[in-house]
Amino acid sequence: MHYTIRQGDWPSDLDAPVQAIGDVGLPDTVAVVGADFPGLRPSFVVEQGDEVTAGQVLFTDRKHSQIAHVAPCSGTVAQIEYGPRRTLSACVIKRTAQTTTQQSVPLDSSTEASVRDALQSRGMWPAFRTRPFGRTPAPDARPTAIFVNAVPGVAAPDPHVVLQARTELFAKGAAVLTVLTDGLVHVCQAKGTPLCPITERVHIATFSGTAASALAGTHIDRLHPVQSGRQVWTIGYQDVVAIGYLFATGQYAADRVVAISGPLSNTPQLVQTILGARIADITADTLAEGTNPVFRSGTPLGGREAVFLGRFDVQITATTRSAAPRKASWLSGAKGALIPTAALDRALAPRVLPVPLMRALSVGDSEAARSLGCLALIEEDVAILSQLCTSGADYGVLLRQVLDELMEDAA
Amino acid sequence: MNAKRPFWASVAGVTLMQTIALVAPSVVTGLANPVGYAVILATSLLTVWFWEGLFAALRRRKPSGHGITTALIISVLAPPDLALWQLALALSLGVVLAELVFGGRGFGFLSPAVVAASLLVFSFPEVALAPGTANVALATIPGAILLLFLGLISWRVLLSAAVGAGVLLMLSIDGLDGLAIAAAMTFCLVFLVCDPTAASATNPGRWMYGLLAGGLIILFSGGATPTTEGIVFAALLASIFAPLIDHLVVLAYAKRWKIADA
């Protein structure tokens, strides 16, 4: 099935990266960043100064002790920082060369219990995010479908290139996913050769069109809407490879192919690195000399300023530092009203009513927002509204507040 | 953020674009009666900016210039022989009640120009608003195209209002002068009925809102050609109903998910 997405058009001036994977060496520092897991309260099993190996458990979720977060590479735990209310801010690891080589032992993927246990105890569980809410799923949750997002976004890596040498691992990962759900595993990709074999439980849907065609929210809306109380999970295609690798060898794979683009990068390109890599370490070669860039991790519209590569991100944009707090000029009008324009009507690909939703979000009316379909969305879906709206409000933040409220009610 | 925000994606940018769209009809109106128009425009601008300045000072905000569009619209609608105190009074109540008490441009649900024009007619029965002329209508077209292109007015409202008015006219009266009707309606349709803050904000709602406004225009005008008063009252009543129309659309949408669940 093919879907052409017309909504959510955003003109991009980014050059498409050269679709060949460059080797820039491993970063000196990596981190697990709390901003990827809002509200996560860790209970650490390592201490500052400890030596860790790749795939070793760093901390578990205090609410669900089965869910482990692991080290992407071997090294020394350099820093453990907490945020407000003992949430995670960041756990920084200084990389050292791997000394011991681990044995390759395939894991059992025949029963659901063994799959869940392996994913949870070996650090792959946080690769899933739920819809609604966009959070790590509970250990015993069962989704009605799983969405693998392999649609290349603007200036993002082309999954066909990334998966070229890993098609078998990808297919194995997708097969493992079918164990977790009663429904289908939807692999969403661009037009072209199927990324994995189509089976009874693994379906392929192709998407093309605007930047919104690369958002999981769009795929879910077209294939399996969640407004009516269903839960689905989303996962990135590189994490599916990592799951395939985990079950094939028993080892944790933190590899990530990331696109680096933006006005400050000389040659937009793909680089092979690992999860949580310090962005400055992996972009040094591609940046012009003497620049003082700001890195955004994530999609060009929805990404956040970051020092370390985000857990769910496959692209980095290097932009110039904006001059000290922008003075509110007459035209920029810091805070204003929401004036409904035609651009807002065409901004969201999921079938929601944008202006009533934006009004409900701005006043924090969670009940109205729910009936308008906000459960189908997370921050990345509404990033475009913040750009187009006359009010200058950040709809990602507003949406998260409403989702948090709805999540508390549901619990 | 790779591309820049569109420059009109701010309230001030919207006002700027609406002002540009209003320049041509204002010039055409002004040329017909330069002195009278200049006095009316100056009074209108002074009035709206006085109130905006006062509210900005009371709320400790920077003064804004959004009232310029209200003043320009009213200056086109006002008859040349209008007493200036009547204009100032109606405009004061219009901008304060329809816009400033809600917090400024875009926060209210009525167009201040529509409210001011309605108050003018309600309060002073001897006042007749200037009928729409062919010249003003022609001068409105470039601005209307600009606003349509930027999405600041909805083609759905424009079309459905024209259809609503046209159908009702055809049913009630024989032998219509299409050009005269279009000339009478164009300016008010573009700048009063289609005002984005006063119209419905959902696409299905916009069709209903436009049909309602178009129908009311004919109902209130009561003749072969719509009168400016009729259009002003129709715009006022339709925009009072716009939030209700939107609410019904939202309810219908919410129902869709419940049905999908069952």
Image: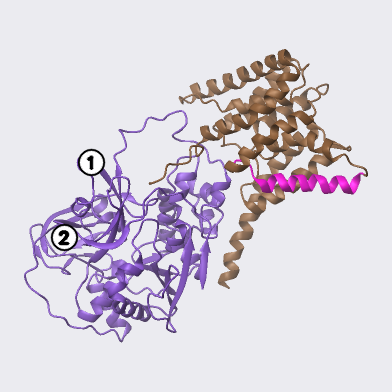
Chain colours: A purple, B brown
Ranked by sequence position, the earlier of labels 2 and 1 is 2
Packing grade of label 2 (10 A; few <14, some 14-19, many >=20) is: few
User: Residue B123, can we see it?
Assistant: yes
Report the disc number at residue B64.
Answer: none
Q: Is residue B260 left or right of residue A140?
A: right
Q: Chain of mark 1?
A: A
Q: Vertically, is A181 above or below A379?
A: below
Q: Amino acid at mark 2?
A: Gly
On the image, the x and y values in percent for residue A254 come to 22, 67
Please tell me in which quadrant of the rendered image residue B26 appears: top right
Residue stretch in magenta: B152-173
Q: Is residue A206 magenta?
A: no
Where is mark 2, residue-wise?
Answer: A25
Residue A291 is tagged as 1
For the C terminus of chain A, give its image quadrant.
bottom left
The spot of residue A379 in percent (x, y) is: 41, 54
Q: Residue at x 27, y 48 (%)?
A: A266
Up-down relation of residue A307 to residue A193 (above or below): above
User: What amino acid is labelled 1 in the image?
Assistant: Thr
Magenta residue check for B154: yes
> In this rendering, would B246 be left or right of A191?
right
Q: Nearer the viewer, residue B149 or A408?
A: B149
Work out how far the residue at label 2 is from the one at label 1, CA to CA, in angstroms. Answer: 21 Å
* Image location (x, y in percent) of residue B212: 75, 46
